[in-house]
Image (cartoon, rainbow, N blue to C red):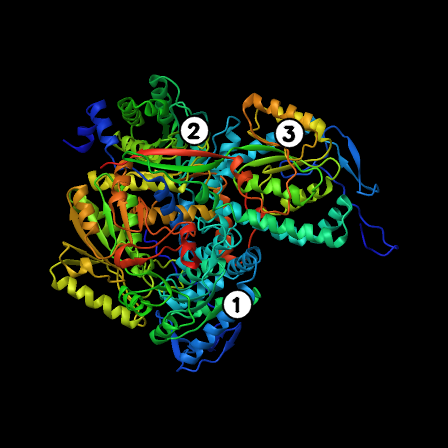
Amino acid sequence: MDFSYAPAPESRSIVDIRSSYGLFIGGEFVDGKGEAFKSINPASEETLAEIACADAADVDAAVAAARHAYDTVWGPMPGRERAKYLFRIARIIQERSRELAVLESLDNGKPIRESRDVDVPLVAAHFFYYAGWADKLAYAGFGPDPRPLGVAGQVIPWNFPLLMLAWKIAPALAAGNTVVLKPAETTPLTALLFAEICQQAELPPGVVNIITGAGETGRMLVEHPGVDKVAFTGSTEVGRAIAKAVAGTRKRLTLELGGKAANIVFDDAALDQAVEGVVNGIFFNQGHVCCAGSRLLLQESIAEDFLVALKRRMALLRVGDPLDKNTDVGAINSAAQLARIRELSQVGEQEGAERWSAPCELPDRGFWFAPTIFTGVTQAHRIAREEVFGPVLSVLTFRTPDEAVEKANNTPYGLSAGVWTEKGSRILNIADRLRAGVVWANTFNKFDPASPFGGYKESGYGREGGRHGLEAYLEH
Amino acid sequence: MTLTAEVARSQGALRTFLHGLPGVDQVGAEQRAAMLGTRSIKTSAKAQALDLAIRMVDLTTLEGSDTPGKVRALCAKAMRPDPADATCPSAAAVCVYPAMIEAAADALRGSGVHLASVATAFPSGQAPLSVKLADTKAAVADGADEIDMVISRGAFLAGRYAEVHDEIAAVKQACGDAHLKVILETGELGTLDNVRRASWLAMLAGADFIKTSTGKVQPAATLPVTLVMLEAVRDFRAETGRIIGVKPAGGIRTAKDAIKYLVLVNETAGPDWLDPDRFRFGASTLLNDLLMQRTKLATGRYSGPDYFTLD
Amino acid sequence: MSTESPARLAVRKTYKLYIGGAFPRSESGRSYQVQSASGDFLANAALGSRKDVRDAVKAARAAVAKWSGATAYNRGQILYRVAEMLEGRRDQFVAEVAAAEGAGERDAAAIVDAAIDRWVWYAGWSDKIAQVHGGANPVAGPYFNLSAPEPTGVVGIVAPAASSLLGLISVVAPAIVTGNTVVVLASTERPLPAVTLGEVLATSDLPGGVVNVLTGSVAEMAPWLAAHMDVNAVDLTGVTDPTLGRELEVAAAENLKRVIRPSTPDWAADPGVSRMLSLLEIKTVWHPKGV
């Protein structure tokens, strides 16, 4: 019997999107002085809302508001009171979770199942986790009375908009800092709803400021002399520029940048779960994941059989309307990103790799790319070295564990890696030798507020999550 | 030599083969099963799924207190689940103890609903092989066209694979034309690795269906266990060309659960298994919930137990 | 304690035991009179017996698997929910603490606020104690070596005699946030806030049996708790008689229970982590590293 799933759309009506949004400064929404821009739904190209753009004066005002709040309210406040504000925010996120999930899918293009089951629960969990540190900093391992840094300027990307906001704001506030955060140009809406949540929680004005804008706004924020700490998640290229911009200043910096992670499958892997892990590793969130397992390193002896199973599994991926509860792969976030994915895929073909996608019907409007694998890839290919940031997997082979480690490490990046084998000692030996900040063994793309995340080498420096995630926001 | 013959030629060969199968990561398998459980099956897809599920039910009564009267009522229910709605399909089969076969055969005659009987000292299987074979032969002679046997879990857990294999093969022979379901009793096997091994062992020995549980032991059927069994039948077909059926039994009480299983089948073994000849539910209370959901889809109102028969 | 106008009679609360998520009376049928700090009659509380202790330990043991098996995040969520319920009952606790401890309303309110904040503090420890007191050990060989704290199991607690809410919370929260289950003997003289705490716990998604509250004579019940062979640790904080304290410690030694000795700390001060650590076992796992 042909069992095709009928449309199962999540209703949009739960979220009330305003026609235009201002900047959130000093606890209020105010007009931006820069030129307003539009945020669109990448699955349909419809305009969702008009967004304010922060110019230099707006950035000034935001930093000043954050400084004032730090000096007069948040800085002097005891940790147990800061904790309770963060707990309130966490609770409200849980209460409004469906609204946040729908809005995230509309603005970003990711499937509702993911924003509902992965993104938003993790967002709430991050606030809960760091709320609990606010009154325990003496136990965090940074001295008996670690002090905050002051005002943090934070710039986040479009791939996990609300989650990246949580990763930045929760530890900063728990440690006693105030923040000015710039969401990505294409995905500002959940950050703006978060601003409303701050109001609902009665967070003191100026503790959190959200300034929308594009690259220029981010640059002005990062370079602002009133900012004590800069945190950036995004491309290695921009990260490099920021590192240069803060050179010679007193500003502390943490960066979470790109990756080209190796997902290593050995001949004794639990095959069905490894197939799942490989698929999840590169097609989750449309491959818009810095730690995506974008290079599959297959032990040669099982390569052929594994690829049969992988292709069979890929054929089950449902690409389509992000608001349909059965969608597995949503829309590409922007026309620009789609162009880049297409370009690199063409490069892959030109380089001689063999391209394969499962047949799927893509909608006419919106930005879409079918999940794709390239086999016969070698380290010398551009598609084995450059981050595609899309649903494209490069498949390479290896013969021995040493060769796998060598190939896995042979990259300027070092964010994450995967290891699939049923042999425990092999997992631990390989994990030791991989130059990556996160090693997933027999699993992939697992995140938890208690677990530190961050990269080696050009994937950035600093860790987010866990006790280690406090370090970036404390004097020590 | 076929895979079956090659592997089953000795205890050593069987052991090497079964222990050489890929392992199952428990957490990964559970997460895959859980993710498939989030599929949202609505409207037309739901209607289709509910009717299919009804057609896949092996309506079961396996109690010491069963009587011909009870069995007759069950058979009537299996043939015509919803007296108020003639469009409702019949169940696949009725499943009873050997002593009740005669009463069931009488009631089901000419209906097309199959008559499954448990055999081989169900549920424990703790009896000599001669007794188990006699049990099987008698059941078939009395009119059962499907036999649900139990494997010797003790022998399996002790690694005596050839013994388990040979028992299944002997029961299969005793079945004659009746089709054989082999109950693995997954709740006693301890690990998903063992579920995979037991599935292969049963298929190599000639099972027509592999079945999760007797329903007398907790846990009975679960989504992760059924996932592993569906992977096994998928891989067995790729290896040998034969299609073996899967039957989860016990603990499947709601239509929602049943639909999750159908999604699991659809996205693991594939649509070829979405057929009562290849997938069954061993259940009793499930049927009424399927009927209730079916009625709700048709009328738009939530229904209540008063509107469905208790047998 | 009620503030209704004289024409309306208040519906008084009966104070029962809290065992296995339910509120039974003592199986002995006994009760005793609880008085305020100034000698006024407050209520009849259950006078717990050795069989109540036995039943409570059984309930606590039955709850161990699920509670210690819950994720740290889940335990933290439930404890935070308890704090929400405590906040909702703030006025009731203020009145009970004022009456029990002879405190003025302002002081009682400060105590209750401190107790709620203390509970919130502990709630935030559930998913952090392992990071602060566990970790990888750099052994001299090709081995992965990890130490992680695990709950000890069932903990018997003698609650502080005088500090009827803040002290009580300061001994109960550290035990359960770490995954243990408890049988707590409330202060003999000042048991009522403990029973109200039980009511708060019962409405907080805390599984039945994780906390069990017995009221009555500590001197009568504590020996049974300290000697019980299915209890893993005893916290004797609230024992005021040194002779009894020593006897209980001797009884506890029979199955080598972990013991927290009697003390009267300043409950307002930062509690530190020692109570939590006393009720945790460190498990260290080795695994070779090789291809």
Q: CA distance from mark 2 to mark 1?
A: 85 Å
Cα distance in 3D space between marks 3 and 1: 55 Å
Q: Which residue is mark 2?
A: B101
Tell me the kind of residue under disc 2.
Ile
Q: Nearer the viewer, mark 2 or mark 3?
A: 3
The quadrant the C terminus of chain A occupies is bottom left
| Residue C173 x/y as whole percent | 59, 43
What number is the disc on residue C86?
A: none
Q: Residues within 10 Å of mark 1 (few under 14, many from 20)?
A: some
- Disc 3 designates what residue? C55
Q: Is residue B112 visible?
A: no
CB under 8 Å between discs 2 and 1: no
**Are labels 2 and 1 assigned to the same chain?**
no
The secondary structure type at the circle numbered 3 is helix
Residue neighbourhood size for the residue with mark 3, other residues' Cα within 10 Å, grouped as few (<14), some (14–19), many (≥20) = some
- Residue B62: x %, y % from top left: 47, 30
Name which residue type carries label 1.
Asp
Residue A71, which numbered label?
1
Subunit that carries the residue with mark 2: B
The alpha-carbon separation of the residues under discs 2 and 3 comes to 49 Å
Tell me, yes or no, if residue C158 can be seen here: yes
* Residues tagged by mark 2 and mark 3 found on one chain of the structure: no
**Which of label 3 and label 1 is nearer to you?**
1
Q: Nearer the viewer, residue C52 or B159?
A: C52
Query: Which chain letter matches label 3?
Result: C
